[in-house]
Amino acid sequence: MKFNFLKNESYKKGIVFSTALNLLSKFLLFLQSVIIAYYFGTEATTDVFFYCFATITLLALFVNNLDTSILIPEAMRLREQASEQRSMQFLNCFLFGYLFFGILVSTLFYIAPVDLFLILSNFDEGVLQSNSDILLLSIPLFTLSITTNLMVNILSSYKFFTIPMLISSFNGLIALLAIVLLHGLLNIKSALIGLILAYVINIGFLLFLMRKTIRWKFTISVTGISRRILKNIFYAQAGNITSVLCSYVPIYLLSGFGPGVVTSLTYGQKTAELPNQLITQQFSSVTGIKFNELYAQQRLEELNRIFRSVAHLLLFTLTPISALIFLFDQNIIAILFQRGHFDNASVARSAMFLKYLGLLLPLLAINTLIARLLMATQKIKVAFIYQTILNGILIGAMIIAVDLWGAIGYPYALVAVHSANLLLSYYLLKMAAPYIHYAGILRYVLKVVFFNGCIAASIYYLNLHVFDSDHVWINTIVGTMLYAGLALTLNFVLRLNTDVNILFSSLKKYR
């Protein structure tokens, strides 16, 4: 059986095909959130579910950070400079290591689930006791996800760019079906059962695919794990601890704010992150592999050109989306979730988070590209020091802001610190990657912000004085179309992003 349809040798084709599949994947995952909102609304049970899922996901991200920062770049180097077998043996050490570590951690959580989650969260013990079955079902996801993610990243390094989206789509579909079919019997636990089943099937599929397509051999040799690799692993994970804490601290803090707050944060966050997942993560995953190749070949000018081109395109694309989220936050939440058990109070709470979290999109895009660049160039120590300091500041800012302004202090702190990071990255790259002309990107940020600020102000005025505020769908659609029309028209005149102009000009030829 051949699986050539899963493989793309071209990076441009990789972006196109994987982005298309990513749309399907994210749609299914987002539909899952909509169904959960419809059936269960925002309550203590959904808070525990989303808290457990977020905690397990963060632990998995912490482990799988090694994949893109250390393991895959080193495996690709071994593949080029040593042999295919050495590369496979190197990765197998970590594949089996992940499996052992996952089982060990899961066993510890099974011994005393309520006690451990009581330490790790701000929930009352009664809430955790009454939802202990959710705690137990969430635990296996850790081992399953870290193993699956490493296998997916291995295949991605062989330019199987569509695999991550296929896996994610399958997970979303099975979880969605489980909720629809079993919600009456199992409540929200049905989603966890669906995910466990999906991961088990996926691991079997990935093992089969690795054996059939790249002739993977599951032999182990620790000779490839040098002192340099161990040192880089230490720095990468030590720096990543603060990143994980930055995501963990808010759900810990907000779990003590009463029923529905963690769930509302989740819906606001999921909505705000959707453009980042659909656009930024997809572009960065493919360009990150390209960064690895260009740096290995020491084609630094080409690396600078691609970095700036992708940065400009992401800024031009994501800044208008941020503005639209800020303008139509309540409308967006109402359109997506307000049905079934998701009432007006749920809309207001979720929109409160969405409004400001949406402003992060262009800031996170640049941060993601810089992270990919530092991974490709193996500037692990520099990245570790910078990341540790920045995340320490962010954690402190979140704690202070939540104490001063309550739950809304969390997005306030994020926007403030990431805005500062955009400027501070100039000094980071000047030291770690001086061949990247980052000053030009900062100038471009100012142009894009001014450009979109003028358009957003116009749409805001029309929304106040022309649009009928009672028609949520019409207001949002008309406002978005006007914004997009103005942005594209002015871009043709001002030539703020020529890549976008070229794209639309080429599309006209196919009419």
Image: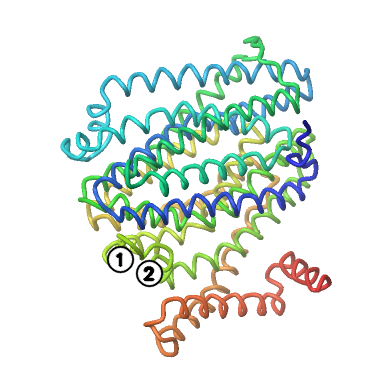
Rendering quarter of residue 194: top left
In the visual, does 1 lie left or right of 364? right
Image-based side of 127 in relation to 75, left or right: left
Residue nearest the viewer, comparing 70 with 280: 280
Q: Mark 1: which secondary structure?
A: helix
Instruction: Give the answer, above or below, for where 53 lies relative to 28.
Output: above
Q: Position of residue 477 (x, y in %)?
A: 51, 76
SS of the residue under disc 2: helix
Q: Which residue is mark 1?
A: 348
Q: Position of residue 39 (x, y in %)?
A: 34, 54
Q: Is 165 rendered above or below residue 79?
A: below
Q: How is the image coloured?
A: rainbow
For the residue marked with disc 2, what is the amino acid? Gln
Provide residue 510's location: percent of width, then percent of height: 82, 70
Q: Callout 1, which amino acid?
A: Ala
Q: Nearer the viewer, residue 2 or 462?
A: 2
Report the residue at 27% width, 48% height from top.
254
Write the residue at 48% across / 35% down: 61
Which residue is depicted at the point 59% across and 48% down? 281
Vertical side of 333 occupied by 152: above or below: above
Q: Quadrant of residue 94?
A: top right
